[in-house]
Amino acid sequence: MKYSILVLLFISCQSESIKEHSTQQALYDIFEGEKIFSEKEFPSWTDTESAVDPFPEINPTAQKRRADYWSELVAKMEGLNKAELSKQDQINYDLFKFILEDKIAQVAFESYLTPISGDGGFHVDFVYMRNRFSFKSEAEFERYLTILEGFKHYSTENISLLKLGQSKGKMLPKAVLKGYESYIDPHIVSKAEDSYFYEPFNKFSFNISDERKDNLRNRAKTAITTSIVPGYQLFKDFIQNEYRPNARESIGISSEPQGKEYYQQRIEYFTTLPLNADEIFEIGEQEVSRIKAQMETIIKEVNFKGSFADFLNFLRTDDQFYAKSPRELMREASYLAKKIDGKLPQAFNLMPRLPYGVAPVPDAIAPKYTAGRYSPGSAADHRAGFYWVNTFKLESRPLYALPALTLHEAVPGHHLQISLAEEMEGVPDFRKSTYLSCYGEGWALYCEWLGQELGIYETPYDHFGRLTYEMWRACRLVVDVGIHAKNWSRDQAVDFMASNTALSLHEVNTEIDRYIGWPGQAISYKIGELKIRELRKKAEKELGEHFDLRRFHDVILENGAVPLFILEELVEEYIKLAAE
């Protein structure tokens, strides 16, 4: 009898194992199929072995073809029994389905008809393209040249999408198109050698004959004069003569056809939580009130005589808070980055192998760019990550905000998180490259807050700078919803941001234009940070003296970017196991 029971148990376990393997295999077949499909649909810029056109098809027919394929995959996934999967594969399932459903929604709402935003788009992404190359082989130069030669056609195709969007009432508002030429003019050069895209040809880091160098350089000059310059000129002419004159006056996405529904979809995507516009707005107002009280405390601490507005004006105009040269700003940013590096072991077990550097934002995009940003690296391409610092218009780059900016963009913010994700092992490839704003930006904002524990903020002004950045993200909740769901004007949004933060007026204006042109993305930062802090508070309360900060950070980071609803489950599981 005992033997029979053991046999039955063994058979049952074997059956469950077979079921799990079968379901897992079906799921991984879906992953692999989509990977092959996307590699064909969206060729890699740097794939030197590819013989296909490096530019993706972007016409409506191609967009619908992709959406139909992704819909088929979702239907297949819904036919699987998720309960038969391991915990890790359930994460794979939930994340992949979330990503596919958003891609399908993007096509359904025809977001591809607006391939530009207030501070980005196909024309700016093309500038980033150059930085993906290491230029350590002739094959890389050949691939790069093929891309340069194809830009004019790619620009023309994007203009066609913008025209179609214009005919359907789906376009950027006029407010964010003022001065848009600043992104375009640097690439309309009279001499090819002065082009940003020609710079790699000035120096070769590998052995190559002078004849081959000359051939590559001549080909580059031709590509710049016949493709790059005309491509940007066509785009400029279109913006100036057709698009901007006919752009909509209203700034909110809700004024577009299906705009209200699209904004709700963006909220759900960028927060990964079941929230609506009114709830976001209310959270923002509460956070603004809380943070402002902390700011008032610091104003009293430094014995400033005057109103809150007077103090903000003092911070914006006093020379002591600003670098005298780009080099000084870069030195301070580099010092802070290394200072933080030395503090990381206090709070982290996991640290990436990939190093990072500090560099200025490229001149070609600096005028309308944010104060700083992270440019990801790649171990496979032997390319470090970079913390970009904007040295344009130094009077708008306060030093008191630099500690928070560095914590956010470099470590332990974006560089640490993104690099760790890329170094994950034993997971499908899409997990390594997935980026969700609520997770990634929420983590980076949490890192600004964590800087207090790490001892990064040395002066009351540094602390005020951190609060200014936190207030900035809290204001985003109010402003983004105000613009896109409550019919706010641009001036109303600017006034709200300027009166509640110490951001320079230049930064305030560039930020507002960014929110107008990118509905919903701005709300992800604060919602993500609040969720991570909420989860940490819960773990601290339930675990008491058994709470381990390093282990908590492991739990947040070790699975890469995941929706917040998955992150909650992971922390709940950590608390349960740690309490045993």
Image (spheres, rainbow, N blue to C red):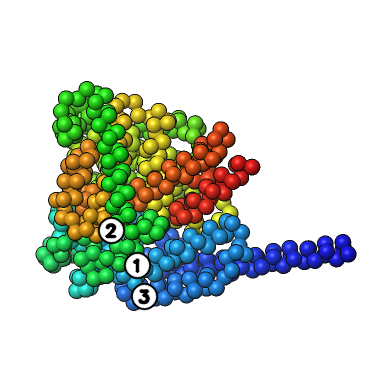
User: Mark 2 or mark 3, which is nearer the start of the sequence?
Assistant: 3
Q: Quadrant of residue 273?
A: bottom left
> In this rendering, would 274 be left or right of 184?
right
Closer-to-camera residue (412/280): 280
Secondary structure at numbered mark 2? loop
> In this rendering, would 513 be left or right of 27?
left
What's the residue at 39%, 65% (across, down)? 102
One can see residue 53 in this view: no
Closer-to-camera residue (81/376): 81
Q: Is residue 451 above or below residue 24?
A: above
Total count of labels: 3
What's the residue at 39%, 45% (across, down)? 529
Distance in Å between CA atoms under marks 1 and 2: 13 Å
Secondary structure at numbered mark 3? helix
Residue pointed to by mark 2: 519
Q: Give the residue type at disc 1.
A: Gln
One can see residue 575 in this view: yes
| Mark carried by residue 4 | none
Closer to viewer: mark 1 or mark 3: 1
Q: Quadrant of residue 260?
A: bottom left
Mark 2 is surrounded, within 10 Å at the Cα level, by few (under 14), some (14 to 19) or many (20 or more) other residues, namely: many
Q: Is residue 350 above or below residue 15?
A: above
> In this rendering, would 185 be left or right of 569?
left
Mark 3 is surrounded, within 10 Å at the Cα level, by few (under 14), some (14 to 19) or many (20 or more) other residues, namely: some
Residue pointed to by mark 3: 64
Q: Is residue 189 above or below residue 462?
A: below
What's the residue at 41%, 36% (across, down)? 450
Cβ atoms at labels 1 and 3 below 8 Å apart: no
Closer-to-camera residue (174/87): 87
